Image: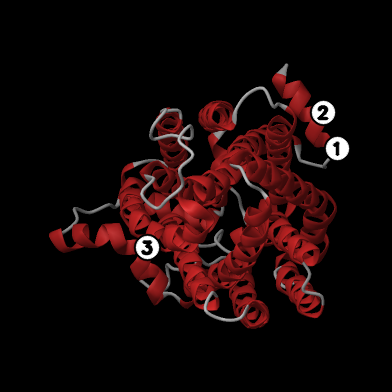
Amino acid sequence: MLKKVVNKLFSLWKVKKEFRLKIFFLSLTFLLMSACQAVWRPLKTSIFAKLVGAEFVPDAKIYSLLFLIPLILIYSKLVDWLRRHQLLYWYTLFHAFGGIIIYFLLSHPVYGMANTDAGPNRFVGWILYFFMESNAAFMSMSFWSFVDSVNDPKEAKNYYGLFVAGSKIGSILMAGILYLSTTFITIIPDHIMLPRFLLIGSFLLIGAAISIYFLMKFVPGYLMHGYEAAYKIEKTKEKTKKKESFKEKLKKPIEGLIVMIKNPYVLGIFSLVLFYEITIVIFDYIVLKKVSATHGTAGALTSFYASYYVIMNLVGLIITLFGTTPLLRKFGIRKSLFVFPTVSIIILITTILYPSTSIMFFALVGLRALNYALNHPTREILYIPTTKAIKFKAKAWTDAFGGRISKGFGSGINKLMQKLAPATALFSSLFLSLGLISGWLIVVFFLSKTLQKAITNKNVIGEESK
């Protein structure tokens, strides 16, 4: 019955019959993971701002780096010990059970949200923020690492937009429910309602783990090879695996960092993450300061961010369905890589010319929507013709650590800007963001050229440097 429904649905998007079940479960998995993210992100910002204080957000972003590094080292070891799909189990279940624990902490009458005295000593607020940063860092990275390993460039061009569409639908539904609940349900106080939504996010992650289980159970193995040249190399390595020396064992946890530093292609991808995240942190903080001052409670601030995520994901869904998929199919991967930085430059110039609160808000919506709907799937295609060490280990450092260190840089810039006059700080931040996105175009030219050469010659990027 399920197979018939899936075939009918995906026939509308010209998905080949043999791929429909695979595309369905991958889309469903990303839908559930993104739905969790759509609930948890507004909770992270609003609860932290009201428990600890909005002025401590830049500090929290910097301190989260210290928390994240051990997790990346653990993840790098898990890459060696577990199979590809089992890494997704690890991510979803670890954060699902972590969310349940934090639910009980937030529900505590003294340490939780019932205590409305804000201050930097509210340790539950810090725990919540660091945990949510871990979830944000590993969610997209763990999903796309797996997806990049089971799809080839042609499948990516045709179907990556559908995975993103699934994520947008999940995000819109859950952010919409959160917005309606925090806006119109007034009989349940914030300190009871908001922790319950944290619990709902945990159940969504458990659902994502179940979806991956069904993917591995019902989709034939030959459809899960991905980029064939890389698949053959990894299979050969498994058969000829030698006993590791003590020195090699010590290097294993930081192998991804070493690969990233030594390989210009991976460094290029890292720089894309750096450019985007610094820019978005600057925009986020400008908007947060303005709205936190006008929204007095955690519930009101959560309601604002929920509405923001609904709008952002709705715009993202429209871009995905009518922009990303047709763009990739019609113009190919190389040309599509240039679209996001070009449009971002136009958005930034608009904010410099018209720096009002509403323009800043819609600029933030536009940048985030374009990133998730267009930039992210096209950037992920860059990983397909690479080794497993790049797809999983180096990707953890470029995406998870790179994303957090970029936020640290962005937060450092925000702290410096606090010392300037408001108008000077605003324009300085915007011009800096414009310079970063302009540098993006140069890096994309190099990456797209290297990608095309590898696919044409059926090479595996990263293997030649060994």
Find residue 211 and report its image quarter: top right
Residue 145 in the image: state x and y as whole percent: 51, 51
The residue at the far left in this view is 246
Q: Which residue is mark 1?
A: 12
At mark 1, the secondary structure is: loop
Q: Amino acid at mark 3?
A: Gly
Residue visible at 44% across and 66% down in the picture:
405
Q: Which residue is mark 3?
A: 256
* Distance from the alpha carbon under mark 1 to that under mark 3: 40 Å
Contact between marks 3 and 2 (CB within 8 A): the answer is no
Q: Amino acid at mark 2?
A: Lys
At mark 3, the secondary structure is: helix
Residue 199 in the image: state x and y as whole percent: 52, 28
Left or right relative to 275: residue 176: right
The answer to whether one can see residue 268 in this image is no
- Asked if 226 appears above or below 459 in the picture, the reply is above
- Asked if 297 appears above or below 453 in the picture, the reply is above
Q: Which residue is mark 2?
A: 8
Residue 436, label in figure: none
Find residue 359 and report its image quarter: bottom right
Residue 89 in the image: state x and y as whole percent: 45, 35
* Distance from the alpha carbon under mark 2 to that under mark 1: 7 Å
- Asked if 255 appears above or below 163 in the picture, the reply is below
The answer to whether one can see residue 71 in this image is yes
At mark 2, the secondary structure is: helix
Q: Residues within 10 Å of mark 3 (few under 14, many from 20)?
A: many
3 or 2: mark nearer the eye:
3
Position of the C terminus by quadrant: bottom left
Residue closest to the eye, 24 or 129: 129
